[in-house]
Amino acid sequence: MRAYGRRHRRWSRRNPQPLLLVPDEPLLIVGLAAIGRALFRYRSGLAPFSSGLALAVTGRLLHHTHTDAWPVVAVVTALAALAAGLRGMPWGLARAEERVYAATASAVAGGWLAAATALGPGRPPLPTVLLVSVVALGIPWWTHRRRRARVRVDRVIHAWPNIADTIGLDGARVMSAVVDTWGWRARMKLRPGQSVEDVVSRVPAIESALGTRPGAVRVEQDPSHAGRCTMRVLAVDPHAGAIPWPGPTARSLADPIELGVFEDATPVRVPLLRRHALIGGTTDSGKSGVLNVVLGNLAACSGVVLWGIDLKGGMELRPWAPCLARLATTPDEATRLLADAVAVLDARAHAAGHENTRVWEPTPAAPALVIVIDEYAELADTAPAAVPYAESVARRGRALAVDLLVATQRPTQKAMGGGALRSQMSVRVCLRVRERRDVDLVLDKGMLAAGWHAHTLDAPGKFYVLADGHSQPRRARAFLVTDDLVRATAARYADQRPDLDPLSQAAIENEPRAIDPPPKTADDPEQVLLTLLAEAPNDGLTIPELIDATGMRRTWIYDRLQALAAAGSARQVTRGRWRA
Ligand SMILES: Nc1ncnc2c1ncn2[C@@H]1O[C@H](COP(=O)(O)OP(=O)(O)OP(=O)(O)O)[C@@H](O)[C@H]1O
């Protein structure tokens, strides 16, 4: 694949555009100019005929002036055919079939020219051979998909300044364009003062101006320059069909998990060790599908114990039961399970404090604990007593290798039982959402404006991911794990599941059976926040002061302040300053 822009600029210098017409020209000149423009516009399609014509003229010239030069022509031909066939030179062809074509065309053209030099281009059967060759070699040329795509792109690039003016992106320039397997992509330089958000907000207008199907244009920020971006135009949707799951690729929680593939066919690898994950999307968007891919991988990991909460009667998680050490399907079981998780946390934190280690390194003998919760809103609704435990795990679990994997339709404050849990989720998978504002709910504030258009995803399993190493709005599609594959994978790894380490096991067994909310400790950031707000001066505390004092992230502070304000426990004294 070669940079289109470079070649195009070089080409334009050598082949200037035909002159524009002025209306009072004589008819003949108007006609000639129109023909010139048509020849220019269709130059790529006409290339086999123009090459044939050029050969005939060169053959005639050589025959009249250098008849004896035919051996030189033959040798040059042989060398050119070899270079094209073996190296794809001088066109930089990477694909074998393109090289074979280039070598054949060079050999036929050079061979014909050598014969025409020696015998004259009019000597039968040379004219017939030339005509037949032009047509025979022209057919693959005319039908070549990438060549046709390049011609289309060429036209778009010429028209781009007008298009940009019309849709309000005046001054945005296309620097280069490349035709790829699925369509083409262009690097764009924006006018000073324009931002990628401006381009993103005009995506529907770009699609209309380029005449593509809706949803065919993607815009990605250039990570090294705020005034540049890449625009991708997909001629065909690479995610149109379901992508079968190839089986587990992770063997330990430290391995990133492959959820699916991006539109450029690169795999979506997401690290889960010491991270909580939120999977959001409307009904039938494929949340259980993503959970299945993650569970299929975690089942194959030696250092992970899996617990599940599925308050839809176990409908989604029961097929994984052979690999789940515990499965809670009622509110009481769920509360008990999360209380036990907190007991595990406490025991691990205690042990880590004694051994002076900061983090719990999972091994098969001392495994990580991953708790999968399908439809968190159901849990918050029917088992409110479980919510403080879940939040405690979310806040303290990462270092102690107790991770949450939560799926929900709409992670509102209410559905999440407050915002504390959501703000701890550092891996966010956003499948199709019903309303545009849900994008910011699942991913984070401002993500919709930044181009994460999950409301336009048009098939189950298509998603955006926000995680370490994934900060650009790139569409992906999750692998599809069929029910049979779920059963087969669960059965295959059932015997290899590790047990909890004795320390964690003892903590569960010694845990008091009454279900009380976990005590709020002095280093509980929520408690710290409440105390800070209560003791704040009359003009309140700023957000940076609250971040410093609690050690929590900005999004967590905002979420909590909003929840507290809604509950009447905090108020904004002046802009950006808060107190109880
Ligand atoms: N990656 C995928 N590729 C193709 N089809 C998928 C994919 N994921 C899910 N589907 C299909 O979409 C449908 C809904 O999927 P799924 O049950 O995972 O959605 P959901 O969001 O969990 O729904 P609900 O909210 O009702 O639980 C299923 O029929 C499933 O076969």
Image (spheres, helix red, strand yellow):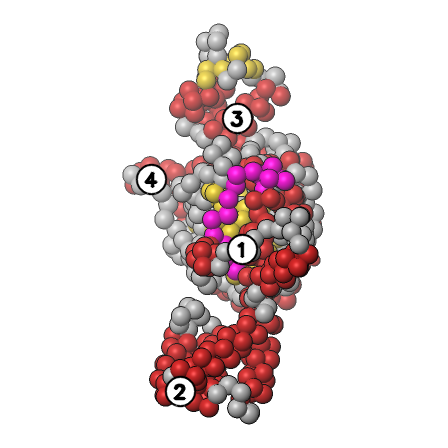
Residue farthest toward the bottom in the current orientation of the protein:
124
The answer to which of marks 1 and 2 sits earlier in the sequence is 1
Q: What is the spatial separation of the Cα atoms under label 3 and label 4, in whole angstroms?
A: 28 Å
Q: Are marks 1 and 3 in contact (CB under 8 Å)?
A: no
Question: Ligand 1 within 8 A of label 2's CB?
Answer: no
Tag 1: residue type? Answer: Gln
Question: Ligand 1 within 8 A of label 4's CB?
Answer: no
Residue farthest toward the left in the current orientation of the protein:
356
Residue at image coords 50%, 75%: 54
The answer to which of marks 3 and 4 sits earlier in the sequence is 4
Residue at image coords 49%, 59%: 15
Which circle marks residue 558 in the picture?
3
Element marked by disc 3: helix
Q: What is the spatial separation of the Cα atoms under label 4 and label 2, in whole angstroms?
A: 86 Å
Please state which of the two labelled residues, at mark 1 or mark 4, is closer to the viewer.
1
Residues drawn in magenta: 164-179
Q: Quadrant of residue 513?
A: top right
Residue at image coords 56%, 66%: 44
Residue 546 among magenta residues: no
The front one of 200 and 18 is 18
Tag 4 residue: 358
The image position of residue 263, as x and y in percent, is: 55, 56
Q: Are marks 3 and 4 in contact (CB under 8 Å)?
A: no
Which circle marks residue 17 in the picture?
1
In the image, is residue 446 above or below residue 564?
below
